[in-house]
Image (cartoon, grey):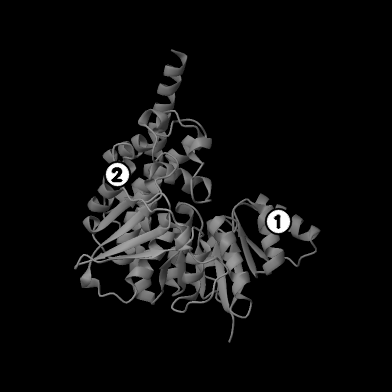
């Protein structure tokens, strides 16, 4: 059996690194890495290149390319072809020998490369939720036109994919996303207002990158997942529910029209979802331990607190109104999260920034890439202005 070529966008992040671990476990006779796309984490990327010997590698800047060449020279590794920027990521996504593209680059940077991979008819293992939030209609249309497969890697959507497998769509009443609740599940609004960046990065169950972890702290990650689920599975907003489940053992559920509920359960490790997306429709043994049900003392479920976590309602609003509003939501959230990490605003300012951008946004049909990219740029400018205003207000209060 010929090995299947794999390209990874975001290879040095959490999902990218775990994808390479899965590939190593499954063996080179099944998969081979043909292309890697990364940003500025050159030391990790150099180690990945030395181990997997891809043909093409993409980095964010020319300076990063120079640094990568130097590190590979020190390791005595033959240089792959090195490309740069978004154009470089597109080249990774369109690599002719890549049958599957793992889209794990964080944020809007993954939009165009992922679209190009779908247009090229490749299987896309999608971990970049922002892509479907910004341009779900374009992405799904591209997949239908080319025959590309779009398989989710996010643990919740991967779980839904497994739960829906073999079920008649008309017999499914709703789908239910689970949320850990993040580090502030049991905290007061005052504690959230005073939360530091390190507090927000202290996720109770998952080890993820900074942006995704902050999204988990505000529960915007769940709001984005609601929009993503709509495009992946075709359910309307009122058919997509959220339940807080702090143990993170049940990854998601579906409710059938007769009241039956089917849940997907497993250990809290992304390698399971990654392997499922790579090998679907087959299943293979996994190096992860099986879930030990006898070790579970209890499983808890509770509704999300929409007063303390208003990002959820903002995401539902964007999905229901549609058009370019979800793209504006995503851009505003990215800018607000970056401002919080830079300690320019507080955690509870993040939904304030997003709401301000949505209120000012002139929604248009999201039918072409140019409109979506224009929306992204305009929303970031609008968010920057609101962040500046909140930052000045915070400084005034600090002085007084």
Q: Give the distance between the C-alpha atoms of the residues marked 1 and 2, in whole angstroms.
A: 41 Å
Image coords of residue 91 (percent x, y): 55, 66
> Quarter of the image holding residue 75?
bottom right
SS of the residue at dot 1?
Answer: helix
* Camera sees residue 368: no
Q: Mark 1 points at which residue?
A: 68
Q: Which residue lies furthest to the top in this view?
A: 400
Count residues near mark 1 (Cα–Cα under 10 Å), then give few for <14, some for 14-19, many for 20+.
Answer: many
> Residue at image x 51%, y 69%?
275
Image coords of residue 58 (percent x, y): 60, 60
Residue in front for this viewpoint, 132 or 291: 291
Residue in front for this viewpoint, 41 or 264: 264
> Quarter of the image holding residue 36?
bottom right
Image coords of residue 133 (percent x, y): 36, 55
Q: In which quarter of the image is the C terminus?
A: top left
Image coords of residue 122 (percent x, y): 46, 74
Relative to 384, 173 lies left or right: left
């Amino acid at each position: 059996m010929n090995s299947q070529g794999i390209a990874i966008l975001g290879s040095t992040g959490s999902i990218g690194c775990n994808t390479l671990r899965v590939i190593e476990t499954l063996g080179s006779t099944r998969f081979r890495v043909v292309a890697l796309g990364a940003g500025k984490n050159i030391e990790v990327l150099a180690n990945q290149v030395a181990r997997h010997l891809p043909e093409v590698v993409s980095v964010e800047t020319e300076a990063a390319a120079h640094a990568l060449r130097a590190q590979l020279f020190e390791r005595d590794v033959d240089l792959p072809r090195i490309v740069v920027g978004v154009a470089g990521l597109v080249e990774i996504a369109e690599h002719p020998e890549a049958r599957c593209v793992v889209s794990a680059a964080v944020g809007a940077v993954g939009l165009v490369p992922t679209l190009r991979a779908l247009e090229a008819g490749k299987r896309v293992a999608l971990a970049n939720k922002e892509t479907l939030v910004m341009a779900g209609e374009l992405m799904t249309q591209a997949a239908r036109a080319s025959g590309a497969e779009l398989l989710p890697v996010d643990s919740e959507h991967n779980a839904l994919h497994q739960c829906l497998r073999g079920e008649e769509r008309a017999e499914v009443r709703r789908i239910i996303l689970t949320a850990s609740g993040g580090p502030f599940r049991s905290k007061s609004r005052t504690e959230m207002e005073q939360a530091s960046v390190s507090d927000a990065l202290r996720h109770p169950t998952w080890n993820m990158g900074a942006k995704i972890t902050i999204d988990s702290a505000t529960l915007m990650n769940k709001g984005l997942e609601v929009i993503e689920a709509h495009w992946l599975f075709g359910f309307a907003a009122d058919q997509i529910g959220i339940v807080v489940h702090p143990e993170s053992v049940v990854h998601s559920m579906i409710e059938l029209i007769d009241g039956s509920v089917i849940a997907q359960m497993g250990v809290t490790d992304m390698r399971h979802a990654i392997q499922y997306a790579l090998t679907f429709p087959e299943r293979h043994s996994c190096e992860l331990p099986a879930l030990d049900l006898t070790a579970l003392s209890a499983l808890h479920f509770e509704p999300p607190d929409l007063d303390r976590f208003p990002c959820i309602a903002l995401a539902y609003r964007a999905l229901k109104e549609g058009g370019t509003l979800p793209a504006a939501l995503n851009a505003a959230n990215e800018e607000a999260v970056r401002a919080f990490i830079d300690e320019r605003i507080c955690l509870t300012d993040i939904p304030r920034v997003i709401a301000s951008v949505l209120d000012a946004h002139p929604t248009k049909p999201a039918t072409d890439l140019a409109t979506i990219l224009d929306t992204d740029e305009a929303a970031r400018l609008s968010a920057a202005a609101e962040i500046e205003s909140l930052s000045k207000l915070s400084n005034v209060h600090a002085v007084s």
